[in-house]
Image (cartoon, rainbow, N blue to C red):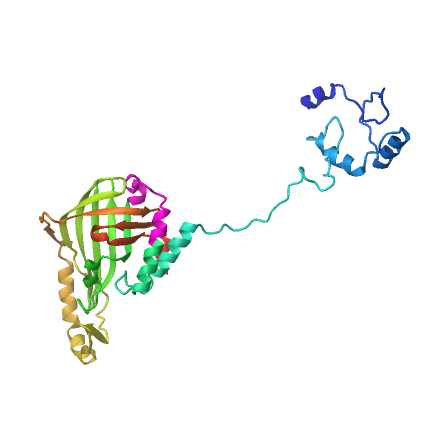
Amino acid sequence: MAFVSQFNQLPCKTLSLNPPHPQLSSKPSIFTINSIGTGARAAGKSAISAREFVWARPAFKVRAVENDDEWGYEKEEPFGDGSGVAVAEEEEKPLEPSEIYRLKKALVDSFYGTDRGLGASSETRAEIVELITQLEAKNPTPAPTEAISLLNGKWILAYTSFSGLFPLLSRSTLPLVKVEEISQTIDSEGFTVQNSVQFSGPLATTSISTNATFEVRSPQRVQIKFEEGVIGTPQLTDSLVIPENVEFFGQKIDLTPFHGIISSIENTASSVAKTISSQPPIKFSISNTKAESWLLTTYLDEDLRISRGDGGSVYVLIKEGSALLSP
């Protein structure tokens, strides 16, 4: 209490309403409000109102911070309305989702039932374009090609307006084959990118991918050069699954009569699939001089990426493992 001891040596005057010769006191005088008013009137002075005195009192306080405080004061409670000394505790409120999060959630929800954009109606496409535009205006990463940690990893295609992918997504092209996943894996340290499409059929699953290199052309744009194609080794499924019908060029074909025949050759097909599964993937070079493209990333954060390619096509990709992929 060295500070208090030094402070105590300073000359102090006791509040008094009877000047001109106040008496020094070793202890602060304590007055009641009524006695102050009475003394003032007796001295011919104007009375100090209780409100004025109470308002002025918090202007100077000494509070004890240890049990052996030399002044012997107890902690004072605030007077009047307590303004300036009382701190009200506010009840903790849960944080509200940010505007960017709400836009991302609305965008992902709008993809429902569109089959990555293949089945999107004109109204849905307009809604998606509006949400994409709003997100691009709030892009937290203005230089995506410099954000290595955000670009790296596997990205799942959730939506595209690129019509070149629609024949691949359409069931009429390959009636018994379903596109399970379209992804893009970026290695920004090796400057490589891999585009991959995973297919599943009644008996096996496989994939087709392209390997490419890229060059940074601007803080947002990269130039991609495709170098190699890879047809993955088919992986045998647990059992042969035959649908009730398939749609081929707009016409439904009933497969029920063929179930018996198909069941009889299931064992043979499984044996063939096992033999194929043991083979290495097929690789082929892409020597076409036109096998190049560019990609402009217009939005990027830890779990969502929006890119635009040749012809104004838009791609919305979600980082593998992101909560946005959950239904």
Residue 136 colored in magenta in the image:
yes
Majority secondary structure of magenta residues:
helix
Say above or below: 32 vs 271.
Answer: above
Q: Position of residue 82 (x, y in %)?
A: 70, 40
Residue 20 colored in magenta in the image:
no
Q: Which residue is located at x 22 percent, y 76 percent?
A: 245
Q: Quadrant of the C terminus?
A: bottom left
Q: Is residue 95 left or right of residue 304?
A: right
Residue 146 occupies quadrant? top left
Q: Which residue is located at x 43 percent, y 51 percent?
A: 99
Q: Is residue 141 left or right of residue 262?
A: right
Report the front residue among 125 and 169. Answer: 125
Q: Position of residue 311 (x, y in %)?
A: 20, 53
Q: Which residue is located at x 24 percent, y 43 percent?
A: 221
Q: Position of residue 201 (x, y in %)?
A: 20, 66
Q: Is residue 158 left or right of residue 55?
A: left
Q: Which residue is located at x 32 percent, y 44 percent?
A: 150
Q: Residue furthest right?
A: 42
Say above or below: 6 vs 284.
Answer: above
Residue span colored magenta: 132-151
